[in-house]
Image (tube, rainbow, N blue to C red):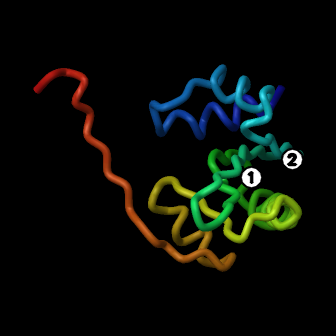
Amino acid sequence: MTWRIWISQALSTQDTHALEDVEKMIEDGYAKLWEGEHSAAVTEIIQYPRLKSLHLWLCGGDMEEITEVMLPKAEKYAREQGCTKLTTGGRKGWDRVMSKHGFTPVASICAKDISNGI
């Protein structure tokens, strides 16, 4: 299926999950797949001590379809699930894209690979 190509591309910028891991999370109900005609997204609900959030985790394909078609559907779904926030993360370019849709950058994440023991 085409969604696997778009989500694989999104996964290529991180090393925390393989496509098989994402498929299992979707199958087990821990993540939700949003399929469009020209894009796909994966979300997960995160329950924090003080709020519930729908996290827009992986997105790939046509940016306009993601932001203009999928995002409003995801926001409606989030409200139906009792979420009071939407969150997302990704490359720095996403801040600019998502700011047009009411998102505000709140943090930056840096990573260091320490697997080599140095």
The residue that mark 1 highlights is 62
Which residue is pictured at 45% across the width and 61% down the height? 92
* Image disc number at residue 36: 2
Q: Is residue 116 left or right of residue 71?
A: left
Check disc 2 and give the amino acid type: Gly
- Residue 112 versus residue 70 in the image, above or below: above
Determine whether the residue tagged by mark 1 lies in a helix, strand or loop.
loop
The answer to whether the residue labelled 1 contacts the one labelled 2, judged by CB atoms less than 8 Å apart, is yes
Residue 102, image x, y percentages: 66, 79
- Residue 34 versus residue 73 in the image, above or below: above
Viewport quadrant of the N terminus: top right
Mark 1–mark 2 distance (CA, rounded to whole Å): 9 Å
Residue 67, image x, y percentages: 75, 64
Q: Which one is in front, 83 or 101?
A: 83
Q: Residues within 10 Å of mark 1 (few under 14, many from 20)?
A: some
Check disc 1 and give the amino acid type: Asp
Q: Is residue 47 left or right of residue 89?
A: right
Q: Is residue 113 left or right of residue 83?
A: left
Determine whether the residue tagged by mark 2 lies in a helix, strand or loop.
loop
Q: Residue 76 sits in which quadrant?
A: bottom right
